[in-house]
Amino acid sequence: MRYSKQRELVYEIIAGTKDHYSVDEIFEVASRKMPEIGIATVYRNVNQLTDIGRVRRIKGIDGVDHYDATTIIHPHFLCRCCGRVYDAKIPYDAVVNELQSHIDDAIEDVEIILKGTCNKCKEKGDN
């Protein structure tokens, strides 16, 4: 795959935040830095970055995809109120090891998605 300044910008936006942006959010940031970029270019580039393994796609509560530049397997929390997606701070390796202790098959991938109400929404009473 050839170098693309648009793809590199999209990657930098995804990698530069702890939030897990949707394409619309990535486009909003990208268009401030590169006004000529189009939403279709952002879609194409997040798909290419996902295909080559530079970013992970996380399906949001409302079906909107969010993107994470941390490609090692780790758990996520999805807020049912605001739709925010972020890394869950749980002992992931311990959970996987516990699961593995109950089956003979070799676990190669585990996707842990926790769904609920984030602290910000709980404080606002949005639950």
Image: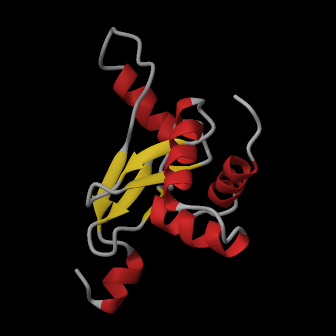
Q: How is the image coloured?
A: secondary structure
Q: Residue furthest top?
A: 104
Q: Nearer the viewer, residue 109 or 16?
A: 16
Q: Nearer the viewer, residue 121 or 60?
A: 60
Image point 39% across, 77% down: which residue? 119
Q: Residue furthest front?
A: 36
In the rendered image, is residue 46 in sight? yes
Counting from the top left corner in percent of width and height, residue 114 is at: 33, 53
Name the image quarter holding residue 95.
top left
Quadrant (top left/top right/bottom left/bottom right) for the N terminus: top right
Image point 62% across, 56% down: which residue? 14
Image point 27% across, 74% down: which residue? 81
Q: Nearer the viewer, residue 5 or 89?
A: 5
Counting from the top left corner in percent of width and height, residue 21 is at: 51, 62
Q: Is residue 47 left or right of residue 98?
A: right
In the rendered image, is residue 22 in sight? no
Name the image quarter holding residue 115.
bottom left
